[in-house]
């Protein structure tokens, strides 16, 4: 077995998983500890059933972040994170549809989420190889 073969059989970097996973878990916990504010923001963005979807999507992010960090059910965990970002990013950070005063902040959040989605996809691909 070559070194490149064994690299695909081991989990990704522990440090990378812990940084990514704990960051996602912290974001989810911030959502859950300010649930009323997050629901109100989602309502303002026109999200239907925001009182149900905000806690559910935050749960996806929390479970996925913990799962990636601990490398438990990694495909499901990475898919949960990707699902969160695919669903949330274009709706909540629609920089193209906001006034000019909010555009930079929404664009920054959109791009940050896009980068996190890319990392979730990379973790998913790696989990499929194991």
Image (spheres, helix red, strand yellow):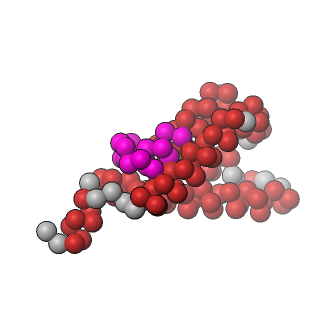
Quarter of the image where the N terminus is located: bottom left
Hey, which residue is sitting farthest left in the picture? 1
- Is residue 43 visible from the viewing direction of this image? no
| 113 relative position to 118: left or right | right
x%, y% of residue 81? 49, 47
Inspect this view and state whether residue 123 appears.
yes
At 63% from the left and 40% from the top, the residue drawn is 29
Give whichever of 8, 53 is nearer the camera. Answer: 8
Question: Residue pushed farthest front?
Answer: 15
Residue numbers of the magenta segment: 62-78
Q: Is residue 77 above or below residue 109?
A: above
Give yes or no for residue 65 being in the magenta stretch: yes
Compared with 64, 128 (above or below) is below
Q: Closest to the observer: 11 or 118?
A: 11
Tell me which residue sits at (40%, 62%) in the image.
13
Q: Residue at x 73, y 36 (%)?
A: 34
Residue at position x 62%, y 50% in the image:
90
Q: Residue 39 location in percent, x, y?
A: 72, 33
**Count of numbered marks:** 0
Above or below for 42 versus 126: above
Residue 67 place in picture, x, y as percent: 43, 44
């Amino acid at each position: 077995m070559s070194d490149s073969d064994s690299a695909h059989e081991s989990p990704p970097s522990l440090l990378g998983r812990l940084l990514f996973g704990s960051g996602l878990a912290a974001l989810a916990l911030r959502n859950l500890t300010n649930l009323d504010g997050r629901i109100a923001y989602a309502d303002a963005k026109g999200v239907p059933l925001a009182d149900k979807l905000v806690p559910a999507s935050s749960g996806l992010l929390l479970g996925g972040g913990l799962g990636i960090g601990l490398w438990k059910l990694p495909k499901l965990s990475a898919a949960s994170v990707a699902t969160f970002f695919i669903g949330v990013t274009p709706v909540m950070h629609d920089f193209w549809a906001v006034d000019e005063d909010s555009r930079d902040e929404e664009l920054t959040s959109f791009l940050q989420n896009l980068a996190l989605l890319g990392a979730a996809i990379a973790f998913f691909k790696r989990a499929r190889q194991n």
